[in-house]
């Protein structure tokens, strides 16, 4: 039986602002299994980022339950969430978030440092090669194209050999050709390496390349036939 990487039960996230309470994610039930490739789609403000941040332990949840690799982290301390993030879950963001003063190789080595894993250059070069950047290891981010920067950020995500890769609008800043290349990399990582991937995207063509599509509206998962997408 496939391992359940993430189990969310009635997961709810509320943002409390001085003047109002925003229910960004409402009672979401979601199981993510080893080897899944899920696209989360929905209109702007529907809760995609909040859901990814919640299952990725970037934020605490307000109500409901969240299990990661079978461990109940619903009310876990920040220090526990940090450890889970550093060891098991990697993120790819729309803005790449590379450190400008570090080379591609040095950017990729950083997560090993934070996870207190051996900073093996060989491993970092290997993941850069995996995303087709073996010839760009010593380039600074400013010397790379947008698509190459996103590939460095994917290599940085892969270097800890995560159980789960979460990507929030990874192609939002890229043209059609580079967006397709990034999705091709995700597809290969999923099909060849068995990596579990969840990606939030506005791009329905790319979203349809995932094995499973989830539509979210007003913080809730809705059946596809009711979706406006
Ligand atoms: N840090 C925050 N504090 C308060 N409200 C927030 C915060 N982050 C998001 N929200 C609100 O929560 C709701 C869901 O936002 P979220 O960013 O998850 O949507 P999204 O689906 O990712 O949108 P987009 O497609 O534009 O990225 C929105 O109403 C948003 O205004
Ligand atoms: Mg978002």
Image: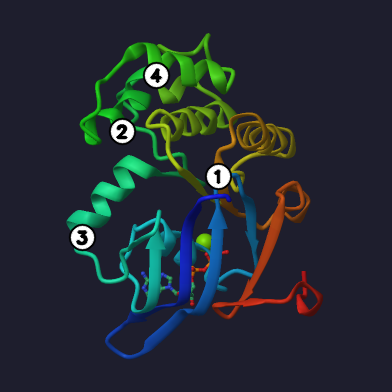
Which residue has dot 2 on it?
Answer: 111
Q: Along the polypeptide, which appears first: circle 3 or circle 1?
A: 3
Which residue has dot 1 on it?
Answer: 196
Mark 3 → mark 2, Cα distance in angstroms:
18 Å
Mark 2 → mark 4, Cα distance in angstroms:
10 Å
Identify the secondary structure beneath mark 3: helix
**Residue 185 placement: quadrant:** top right
Query: Which residue is found at the position 67% from the left and 38% from the top?
Result: 183
Is label 4's Cβ within 8 Å of ligand 2?
A: no
Frontmost of labels 1 and 2 is: 1
Q: How many marks?
A: 4
Q: Residues within 10 Å of mark 3 (few under 14, many from 20)?
A: few
Query: Which residue is found at the position 32% from the left and 70% from the top?
Result: 74
Label 2 with label 4: CB-CB less than 8 Å: no
Query: Which residue is found at the position 35% from the left and 90% from the top?
Result: 20
Q: Along the polypeptide, which appears first: circle 1 or circle 2?
A: 2
Which residue has dot 4 on it?
Answer: 124
The colouring scheme, among rainbow, by chain, secondary structure or one colour, is rainbow
Identify the secondary structure beneath mark 4: helix
x, y (%) of residue 142? 44, 24
Mark 1 → mark 2, Cα distance in angstroms:
19 Å
Mark 3 → mark 4, Cα distance in angstroms:
28 Å
Image-based side of 227 in relation to 27, left or right: right
Which residue has dot 3 on it?
Answer: 78
x, y (%) of residue 65? 39, 74
Q: Residues within 10 Å of mark 1 (few under 14, many from 20)?
A: many
Frontmost of labels 1 and 4 is: 1
In the image, residue 83 sits, relative to residue 228, either above or below, namely above
């Amino acid at each position: 039986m496939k391992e359940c990487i993430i189990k969310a039960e009635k997961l709810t996230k509320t943002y409390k602002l001085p003047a109002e309470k925003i229910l960004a994610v409402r009672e979401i039930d979601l199981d993510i299994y080893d080897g899944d490739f899920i696209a989360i789609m929905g209109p702007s403000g529907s809760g995609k980022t909040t859901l990814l941040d919640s299952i990725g332990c970037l934020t605490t949840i307000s109500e409901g339950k969240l299990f990661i690799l079978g461990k109940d982290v619903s009310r876990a301390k920040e220090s526990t969430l940090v450890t889970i993030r550093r060891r098991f879950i990697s993120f790819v963001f729309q803005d790449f978030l590379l450190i400008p003063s570090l080379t591609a190789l040095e950017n990729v080595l950083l997560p090993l440092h934070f996870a207190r894993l051996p900073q093996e250059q060989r491993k970092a070069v290997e993941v850069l090669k995996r995303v087709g950047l073996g010839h760009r290891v010593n380039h600074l981010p400013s010397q790379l194209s947008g698509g190459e920067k996103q590939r460095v950020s994917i290599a940085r995500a892969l270097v800890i050999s995560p159980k789960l890769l979460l990507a929030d609008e990874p192609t939002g800043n890229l043209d059609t050709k580079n967006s397709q290349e990034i999705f091709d990399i995700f597809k290969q990582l999923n099909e060849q390496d068995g990596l579990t991937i969840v990606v939030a995207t506005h791009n329905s063509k790319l979203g349809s390349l995932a094995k499973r599509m989830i539509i979210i509206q007003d913080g809730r998962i809705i059946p596809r036939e009711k979706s406006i997408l």
